Amino acid sequence: MKKFLLVLVFAVSFVIKATTVFGAEVSEETKAPAEKPAKAKAIVETLVPQTEESDKSTETDGNSSEMKIQNNITFGQVTSPIEYIHKNDSSGNTLAPEGERASGKNNNSSSMSAEIKSSPSTVGIALIPMGGGTVYQGRWNNHIRNNYTLGVALELSIIPLLSLEAEVAQGRYYISYSGYGHNFTQYTYGGSAKFYLTRGVLQTYLGGGILGITYQNMTYGMDSMSTYDRTVGAGQAIAGAEIVLSNNIALGVRGSYIVPLFNRPRVMSGGGYAYPSYEEFSAMNTAMYRLMGSVKISL
């Protein structure tokens, strides 16, 4: 009986131990599947807020970019309906922002000044040195020789196609007739209006004006013992052309026809040059042609 009790106690103890161990193992296996979803859920819960936050940040960034774009469209370029109208041309194309238009305006201003600089000046003051010769017409053509004619003109542009010009010139001549001859000096001075037909690299013009012609060292012929000076009023018609080399320099040529009009000496002619002692009166009463080369210097 005693041995049976010992065996019974041992058997009961073994069953309890085995039950306890098995129960513990079952409880661990049961807890493990239950904890895994919890951990997964925790992981999901930890990830979901980040995802939501990132989505929110993405949405916020998207909204902010959209707002930026919207602001750039609605507020960055146009601040009022009036400005919107001014910033759109007649075809409906949106123009550049005000800052860009200002910079573009500055760029256009700089390019226009370069073109102005590269193009010939049409308004202003110009100094025109000239040199050439003068030829008398008629019977005095073969009896009066021009050694040189030098002059200078000052041109004032009123409008691009109209200029006023003041000029002075000096010429040295030799006159001969009936076996007698001598040198004399001629001064011309006056003003003209010039009408430009073309403006650009090639400039052409027509014009006309009034001149005073002063003759110095004139005589009364081969028996004359003295000299005298005489001033004659004349009209002048001019035509010319200039080639523009730069903004300030142009080379040109001009021709003029000068006709005595008033204060002319009275000529008594017997069919030749004139009556004796009046030969040079006849010369001073004769028209002439003048051809001059010029350099136009714009000031």
Image (tube, rainbow, N blue to C red):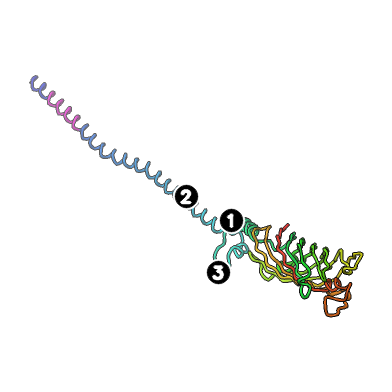
Q: Is 163 one of the magenta-colored residues?
A: no
Type of amino acid at the residue the image marks with label 1: Glu
Label 2 neighbourhood size at 10 Å, few (<14), some (14-19), many (20+)?
Answer: some
User: CA–CA distance between discs 1 and 2?
Assistant: 28 Å
User: CA–CA distance between discs 2 and 3?
Assistant: 35 Å
Q: In the image as oriented, which residue stretches furthest toward the right?
A: 225
Numbered tag placed on residue 91 in the rendering = 3
Q: Is 15 one of the magenta-colored residues?
A: yes
Type of amino acid at the residue the image marks with label 3: Ser
Residue that numbered label 2 is attached to: 61
Eye-nearest disc, 2 or 3: 3
Q: Is residue 132 visible?
A: yes
Residue that numbered label 1 is attached to: 100
> Seen in the image, is 72 located left or right of residue 154?
left
Label 3 neighbourhood size at 10 Å, few (<14), some (14-19), many (20+)?
Answer: few
> Seen in the image, is 175 located left or right of residue 9?
right
Type of amino acid at the residue the image marks with label 2: Asp
Quadrant assignment, res 1 = top left
* Prevailing secondary structure class for the magenta stretch in the rendered image: helix
Whether residue 232 is situated above or below residue 78 in the rendered picture: below
Mark positioned earlier in the residue sequence (1 or 2): 2
Whether residue 193 is situated above or below residue 295 in the rendered picture: below
Say which of 82 and 45 sits in front: 82
Q: Residue at x 55, y 63 (%)?
A: 94
**Region rendered in magenta:** 9-22
Instruction: Say whether marks 2 and 3 touch (CB < 8 Å).
Output: no
Q: In the image as oriented, which residue stretches furthest toward the top?
A: 2
